Amino acid sequence: MSQDHDDHAKLLRLAEAFAESILTMSDDDVLAEVGDERIARVQEVVTEVASNVSKQALLKAKADREAWTASRPSNVVSLLGSSARSQFDQLRRRDRELDQRVTLAARKGKAPTDRDVEGLMDDWEDLKGLDGQDKSE
Amino acid sequence: MFLRKLHKRPSAPYVMPTSDIAAGAEGDEQLQFLIEGIYDQMRGAKLQELLGVDAKGLATVYKRLSRLLTRSKTKVTS
């Protein structure tokens, strides 16, 4: 083993032991050994890092949200709504009694929303299913 | 980015020769024992036994080693 290699190994051992000794020191001992200036510098760096990490997380969240908004099929709800609305209008035209019940007056002046219409269509599909069962029995 | 800031050092890091460390520890028998013990990969209880001190005493000698290394580096690099 060359002298340089030997010295390197010794210094490495010294560095490891020194690092271990620092890790086992109490906070008070560490503070006593380190100057205020260095402590302030480390606090500054840690604060800056924490701030940068938060900013990065916020930017990522914003980018993810924008990507999600851009990829979302925004017309799905309206298409379903318009389909249900069209079926609903056909039903109303065929069934006068239903038409009376869903008039503006019957609904206290409120026109049925797309959600209401979809709900009614679901109920209608259920009723058709029950009707089919009755006939088959 | 922050790692670069933490490691703001000269391009060629200073490495203290072991001869400088030995010279710095001259006259302090406990410190010499500590250094030799560490070179022989001793730790904790074994070092305490070698130096004839308890845990607190060992911590005190470690502090002297810390000051020696800091002092030596300042002297050589200035």
Image (cartoon, coloured by chain):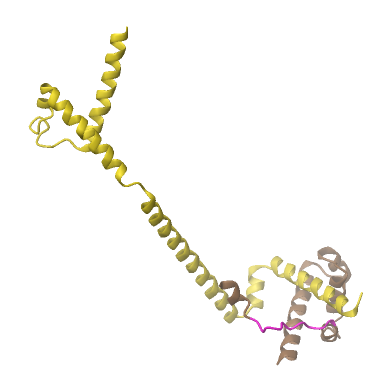
Chain colours: A yellow, B brown
Residue that appears at 38% across and 56% down: A66
Position of residue A92 measured from the top left corner of the image (x, y, whole percent): 14, 27
Determine whether, in the image, residue A56 is placed left or right of residue B26. left
Determine whether, in the image, residue A96 is placed left or right of residue A78. left
On screen, A84 above or below B32? above
Determine whether, in the image, residue B71 is placed left or right of residue A93. right
Query: What residue range appears in magenta?
Result: B9-18
Image quarter for residue A77? top left
Image quarter for residue B6? bottom right
Residue that appears at 31% across and 12% down: A133
On screen, A133 above or below A7? above
Residue that appears at 80% across and 72% down: A12
Taking the view exactly as shown, the residue that stands out farthest to the right is: A1
Residue that appears at 43% across and 63% down: A59
Image quarter for residue B70? bottom right
Taking the view exactly as shown, the residue that stands out farthest to the top is: A137
Position of residue B20 measured from the top left corner of the image (x, y, whole percent): 82, 86
